[in-house]
Amino acid sequence: MKLCTIGLGYIGLPTSLMFAKHGVDVVGVDIHPEIISNLNSGRLHIEEPGLEEVLQEVLTSNKFRATLSPEHADVFIIAVPTPNKKDMHQSCDLTHVMDATSNILPFIKKGNVIIIESTIAPRSMDDHIKPMIERTGLTIGKDIFLVHCPERVLPGRILEELVHNNRIVGGITETCSYKGSLVYKTFVQGEIIQTDAKTAEMSKLMENTFRDVNIALANELTKICFELDINVLDVISMANKHPRVNIHQPGPGVGGHCLAVDPYFVVAKAPEYARIIKLARDTNVSMPYYIVNSVRMMLEGIRKPKVAVFGLAYKGNVDDIRESPAIDVVNILMGLENMDVALHDPHVKSGKMPVVSVEDAVNDADLILILTDHDEFKQMDYDKLSNLMSNKLILDTRNCIDATKTDVPVANLGNIYQ
Ligand code: SAJ
């Protein structure tokens, strides 16, 4: 089998490498020449545990190569970004998916399987992708097989989840679903569930929406508990002792290219009904302001305070800053008069954000503001580090450090004041 993947980002690259590792001849396509030359020389442009080793392995076995333009293949997988449009409801921008589909059209032939893995708004396959393919004159379900198989892997655990997660394969026809499922049988050990395209689209969106709404509940509860002088973290851990309750963790907001993006695709399709989903988004988007207010309360009385921000990535142990709430917090803090802000993130390269060393960040700082739960922050010697500070305060918005291991006062979202 020969596979041509379009898009070599957080999903397309690990997926390509996994197929190559399992004996498939893979050609990966991306529009960025530097990504192509880096990958062909064994260098990654994204951080993901275990990925570098797999890249070396499939380059050595000649099962993978990267290139700028598509080629004939048996299977095409499209894994390009679907951002929000800048319209009223932030609907799904299908431009990259449509472009990628149009770019492979000259190379498709009878018997091919075309798979869209990008997260897309409900009905995108039926209303937009299917008509494009049909214009070639090929009959879907007979000559060519079109499916939506949404990616569902968790950054940080991608290689493991690619193999062990269940896959939803939503075909335009039943034969399409069947042909699509055969492709994933190459390495998927989880269940491969066949359905139609629009059910697959909506299921994927609901997975991320469920999580976003649940986190919004935790964030709303944080504000309620603060007003009532109750520790929200204790409340959540007590409530979660119930066998059917699982409230997620509050934090500075919800980031990444999935939870902070996908729920809007549903809202935009049915705004009059998607009310909880929209409110949850608004609640999560409000959290950076809540965090900055908390910082201001903790620093009250200090003339020109300095905040050392720990963590810019949208979540722990990744380098991805897309939609990161930490970036929103930083922007709001930097907009305040009489506030110094220094940024530290061991995973984020200085080209992306003006990050400094941990010592430079805390030097003369009044407060360490932890916004991302990187392992490095959990293991830090805060007693030693705090000797560089003017005032010794930590606000751990991720509740990730062990406050009993340091003499520095540690506040968290359950306990803003010290
Ligand atoms: N977060 C909280 N509280 C929590 C859990 C997460 O504030 O209790 C925040 C994180 O810090 C982060 C954001 O939510 O800012 C999203 O992180 P995440 O770990 O929940 O998810 P992602 O965006 O890394 O990956 C999600 C996953 N979806 C689900 O778990 C339902 C993943 O399986 C999907 O493949 C991925 O979205 C995607 O690409 O759609």
Image (cartoon, rainbow, N blue to C red):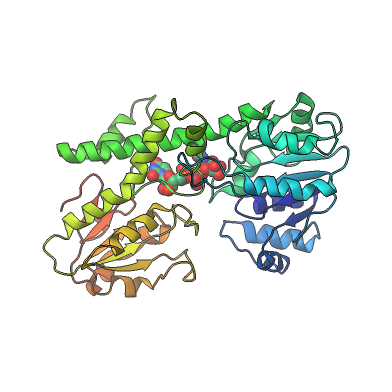
Residue lying at the far right in this picture: please name it.
Answer: 110
Q: Residue at x 40, y 29 (%)?
A: 275
> On the rendered structure, is 370 left or right of 313?
left
The answer to whether one can see residue 399 in this image is: no
Q: Residue at x 71, y 63 (%)?
A: 56
Q: Residue furthest left?
A: 301
Q: Residue at x 23, y 74 (%)?
A: 364
186, 16: nearer the viewer: 16
How many numbered markers are drawn? 0
Q: Quadrant of residue 280?
A: top left
Is 395 above or below relative to 258? below
Percent across and percent down for residue 249 are 35, 41
Residue 362, percent across and down?
29, 70
Q: In the picture shown, does residue 100 fall above or below 176?
A: below
In front of the other: 143 or 381: 143
Query: In front here: 328 or 95?
Result: 95
Q: Is residue 377 above or below residue 130?
A: below
Whether residue 374 is visible here, answered yes or no, is yes
Which corner quadrant of the image does residue 229 belong to? top left
* Viewer-closest of 106 and 397: 106
Q: What quarter of the picture does the N terminus occupy?
A: top right
Question: What percent of the width, then of the height, locates residue 383?
Answer: 25, 66
Could you tell me which residue is drawn at 61 percent across and 56 percent down?
50
Measured as percent of width and height from the top left, residue 220 is found at 29, 37
